[in-house]
Image: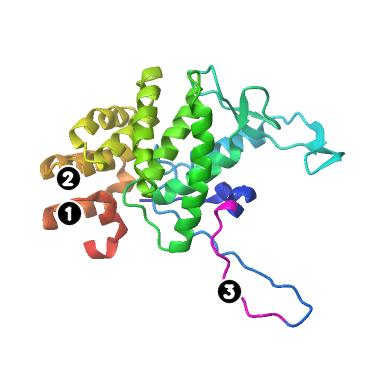
Amino acid sequence: MTIKPLAYALLATSVLTACSTTPLQQQKPPANEPFVYTEPELSPPFYALNPFNYEQPPVFELELKKASAQQVNKLEVTDPANPTQKMILETNKLIIPTINSKQRAMKYAVLAGDNEIDITAIDDFLQMVEGKARHYPPQFTDRQERKGFESKLKEVSTQLDQLASKPDASFDILIRAFKASILGRNLDLGSAYTTKSLDYAQRILKINKEDPEANLWFGFSLSEGGGQKEALPYLDKATKQGVQEAYLSTANTYLGMEQKKNAIQTLKNYKVKYPSEAEVADRLIQEIEKQGRYNVWQILKNPAQAK
């Protein structure tokens, strides 16, 4: 499996600052010199950042490239940090509607308008969390890093919940609130996140029951919560719409149902559909046949054990 680097996902300094872990301890500097703290770098993502296609850059990165390629309409505004000064906005941001939109409606502009929100920083952060916690259990190697993600996710989820509480909340808002709630559940932040995720899934699928991302996330979240049988129709729909990770989630679901033959056949189909993943598929099949391993993601976590 090819795991893409964070690349553009690390551009939002404000998000990284909010997510940063406890600074590393430094030696005490000489008198009259300031302390200098060095924040630890984020560890690499465990899951591919583009679940639709592992060979493609993350969706967030693709959107940033589209934004940078589009003409910029510069805007002079009052500097919020200094009301007496003006500042020029000259970088396109990712803007989505907050209400009255039943389809994805991303646009690129330097500033959000009425009933819109600059979602750039939120999308950046959600992608980083996905790389570690899209599936359960989450894959963190650093405790402090996880705590930083948990703290920031609570804040982001609350912000999205407030926007999603409106009966006419946009599809773009609902899908992000949905993902944040699943990530919160995976990080064991409380049962409320599970309840919220089910509510958001129902609202989203009522608007568009064919959305591939919604079907993928609802499918694997049901499966990883114990509802394997209920998950299969959603994962099947995502698979038929070409979502690469739906194959692995389906195989994992069959393992949870103790249907090893179906899990192996799904992985064989995956190998045919994605030849570049042949080595991964073969390793998973070998592990299932040899030890009956029950979790695809745990197998991928320990490749050396499969040799």
Q: Is residue 118 above or below residue 21?
A: above
Kind of element beneath mark 1: loop
Question: Residue 4's x, y, as percent?
Answer: 46, 50
Query: Three-letter amino acid code at disc 3?
Result: Gln
Q: How many marks?
A: 3
The local secondary structure at tag 2 comes to helix
Would residue 307 be visible to someone looking at this image? Answer: no
**Outermost residue, right direction?**
84
Q: Could you tell me which quadrant the C terminus lies in?
A: bottom left
Q: Which residue is mark 2?
A: 255
x, y percent for residue 61? 55, 41
Graded by Cα atoms within 10 Å as few (under 14), some (14 to 19) or many (20 or more), the crowding at tag 3 reads: few
- Which residue has dot 3 on it? 25
Of residues 220 and 184, the one nearer the viewer is: 184
Query: What's the magenta region?
Result: 18-29
Give the residue number, with chain letter if any, for mark 1.
Answer: 293
Residue 148 falls left or right of residue 15: left
- Whether residues under marks 2 and 3 lie with C-beta atoms below 8 angstroms apart, the answer is no
Residue at image point 33% right, 29% down: 215
Label 1 crowd bin: few (<14), some (14–19), many (20+), radius 10 Å: some
Does the magenta-highlighted stretch encompass residue 234? no
Residue 199 lies, with reference to residue 278, above or below; the image says above
